[in-house]
Image: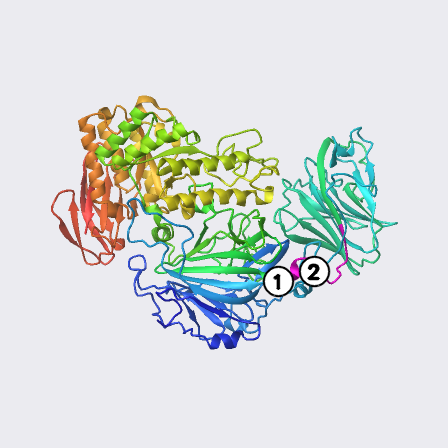
Amino acid sequence: MTAIKNPLYYYLILCFSAVSQFSALAQSDLQTEPERPSKPPTDWLLEPTPYQADVYQTNRPDELALSNGLIRRTFRIAPNVATVAFDNLMTGEAMLRGVKPEAEITLNGIEYAVGGLQGQPNYAYLHPEWLDQMRNDPASLQFVRYAVSEPEAPFNWKRVRHHDKSLEWPPEGVHLRMDYRLPEAEDLRKSGQLLPSDYGREELVSTNFKFLDDAWKTVASRAHPRSSFVNEGKVGEIYTPAHSSVFVERELSENTQLVEAKIDAGTDTSSGWGPGIALVWPEQNIKFYLRPGGDEKGSTQPVFGLWDGEETHTIQGKETLELSAPWTLRLRWDQDSLYCEVKGKSGIWQSLKSIKGFRESPTSVRVGKMNPRGEEGDKTGDTGELVRLHILQFAAYSGDNGGSAPQAESQTQAIKVSVHYELYDGLPVMAKWITVDNTSSEPVIVDHFTSEIIAAVEYGSAVEARKYLPDVPNIHVETDYAFASFDVEDANHHAVHWQADPDYNTQVNYLMQTPCLLKVHPEIGPAQRIAAGESFSSFRTFVLPHDSYDRERKGLALRRMYRTLAPWTTENPLMMHARFADWERVKKAIDQSAEVGFEMVILTFGSGFDIENDSQEYMDQMRKYADYAKSKGVEIGGYSLLASRSIGSGQDVVMPEGQQPTFGNSPCIGSRWGQQYFDKLYRFYEKTDFSLLEHDGSYPGDVCMSAEHPGHKGYEDSRWSQYQVISKFYRWCRSQGIYLNVPDYYYMTGSNKCGMGYREVNWSLPRSQQLIHTRQNIYDGTWTKQSSMGWMFVPLTEYHGGGEAATIEPLHEHLSHYQSMIASNLGGGVQACYRGPRLFDTDETKTMVKQWVGWYKAHRAVLEGDIIHLRRADGRDIDYWLNVNPGGEEKGLLSVYNPLDSAIKRKIYVPLYYTGLKETALVKHGDQEATAYPIDRDYGIWLEVEIPAQGYSWYVIK
């Protein structure tokens, strides 16, 4: 071996100081990256074994490369760590056009860049010669050491049922960890970065307005008898007409140089009379405030306002002024200027405007609703409707005394932030995440993080982009923090952000809006407290550069990623949804499943199954069900609804004003009820030996404003805290071998199957229409999902309606349709939820089902391979697809369906490239003898197919 990775789990740690980084690296055992052919020697989708992941030293002593021959990420590690190249070796393209920090993290209110280099003169491209002139930012986190190891599984996978046995868990590859320390306090101060108000300042005044001390003077409008700063006993709650003034005022000491107020605008609809803070001098005021009603030009979009003593300014910050959560406004001044700064949901301070020529200190401060000039007074004429808002906190601080936050000095060395990278053998996917270890004696708050930043080469350029921006780069990005959708992009939209790059000022787009900067971060929070001695881990991001723009090939790459990084998705049991949960009918469902070869019985919704019944009697009854199922070689599980219902009594999510839960109603997982619910789930599976959960209405990412729920503190940490609860449970299920049907994108946290993509009421359509929808759903869903990743539906009994025309029961009376539904699903390797009281009602029905199950199991390896999309079902002609498994004995299985009333015989072209066959294909139609076909230069054959009316034909290819 010439690289770091070693089959014996060789673990290497190299430590560097600021002075000795180069010499330490030069003396290490690192070898340079071996020469690779200019073009990959094999197609990795067919033969991945040549592409082994390793970490190498480049031809420079201050660079490392993480590569597997498909993609390569190169790092400078001095004077700080920065990604200086990200190359797609499959296409020969450079994907990186600029250097950015490796991550960003906000700790205790301070935003830090993690590594990175500054001084790139042009972000259209990255010239290697520029790198030596680029400099370290001493205010960023500073690189300390790195370590190389093999990947470790983020959770265990207990293999208890049929799956693709060629897959490893954890996947083979290499793990690179880079450690950083906090910058010195003086370097942070010199950077000019916006810091928390208490950083290096003495707190002079602080109140959360539980009461008003004598230093405060109250000024209330006379426009309404209820105008007050204390409404219904709640201090700080202002109740007054929109265009009137209600505020409190107090004197400031001479050494005050910063004041701030946290304001919930509530129902305020004013503009000039918006709530804020004002500094008062004998001859002038300066007012900084919220304008919920918009600007003076007629726009109703909320903005910030500033009266600078002479004129009014309306200001739109970098962060949208979303009034569903409180904002903190801050006025900070020094000898030269006054700075208007704000902090919203992100927890990060941003500067909006400064006023030059600032000299004398103000004498007092006002907080609340004032007129547009920060004075007492109401609007002449109509003062508007009554509004309610809340001044939540106020504080005043001294000037910077040269110190630091109380914990900053001790935590500089005691807080370790690590950035982790994993690269896998035979797969062009890089995973990345960050961890924070707190070995100090004080808690640390992780307010926010961005775990991946890539200044990518743009997909395209558009001078004008008034309505449509160019596409994002040809790189797939997703996380294991995905929910609220059947589809990958939609499920990740709250974490994966392609945006404009503010440093790219030479781009073609006139408004500089080209979406070419990838930033992966949660929209909200996480706002997590790390106690002394504890650690925090972010979600994982998976970056997959594509080697083609072809839809099929891109889909194949994504499906290969899931097989590798979520191999439990290859578990694909045949499932019956038992319509009733009483013993006799469950026993019958188990017996029938065993007789025809089905592998799992699910006590479906509406069956009477109640997983929340934690009585000992019920547990014993369910254990009886499980023992009987096991004796028959069948697994059993049940259904539970989480979201999409209301619990009441303060247990539901409290949404921001104007917002609704994703599914209309939802309990908060962090509520007392939520904690008890998950306790019941754990207990049920520990005591009953059930081995499946169909978890409907899974957590969809709803936030919660409640401060009373024990599982979270408020809005900022509500999404992260709830997600940790459910993802921990799903990972536990995976470690126990419990199968998970979850109608949300939880694959990367342990879920086995999601919906293939269907509309439930379509299963109330006439039976003939259901057949077409079935094959359309499978065809469309398998562009991004493996066959085993999505469920379909077969309504043996009436579902949402439709009556006899939509229903298969009595089964023997609709045997042909029943068979067609089975063939349509199993012919694509897809499992459906066969929902009803039985799988067969006559011997003839039983024989049909058993034969198709036997056929499926005989060809299971190829049927559960990838689908190659050939012709989508439309009811007008034959439709067909090709399942492929290049590593199997059966390389392909072609399924051809005929929805017409007459038989069809014709030649069709079958592309065989992804079967791995190159010269000859042996094709066997049903039970006939195999025929040899020469494969043409486009890796395909012309095949004559024959399909009976309303029928199905299949062809095995070897």
Give whichever of discs 2 and 1 has the lower sequence position: 2
Mark 1 and mark 2 in contact (Cβ < 8 Å)? no
Q: Mark 2 points at which residue?
A: 404
Residue type highlighted by circle 1: Thr
Q: For residue 601, what is the image quadrant?
A: top left
- Look at the numbered disc 1 and give the secondary structure of its residue: helix
Q: Which residue is drawn at 26% across and 55% down?
A: 913
Give residue 814's position: percent from left, percent from top. 24, 26
Based on the picture, tell me whether residue 506 belongs to the magenta stretch. no
State the image quarter where residue 863 is shown. top left
| Residue 102 image point, x, y percent | 53, 61
As helix, strand or loop, the secondary structure at mark 2 comes to loop
Give me the disc on residue 7: none
- Image x and y of residue 765, in percent: 34, 28
Residue 866 visible in the picture:
yes
Query: Which residues lie in the magenta part?
Result: 396-412
Is 74 in front, or is 918?
Answer: 74
Q: Mark 1 points at which residue?
A: 412
Q: Which residue is drawn at 44% across and 72% down?
A: 57
Residue type at tag 2 = Ser
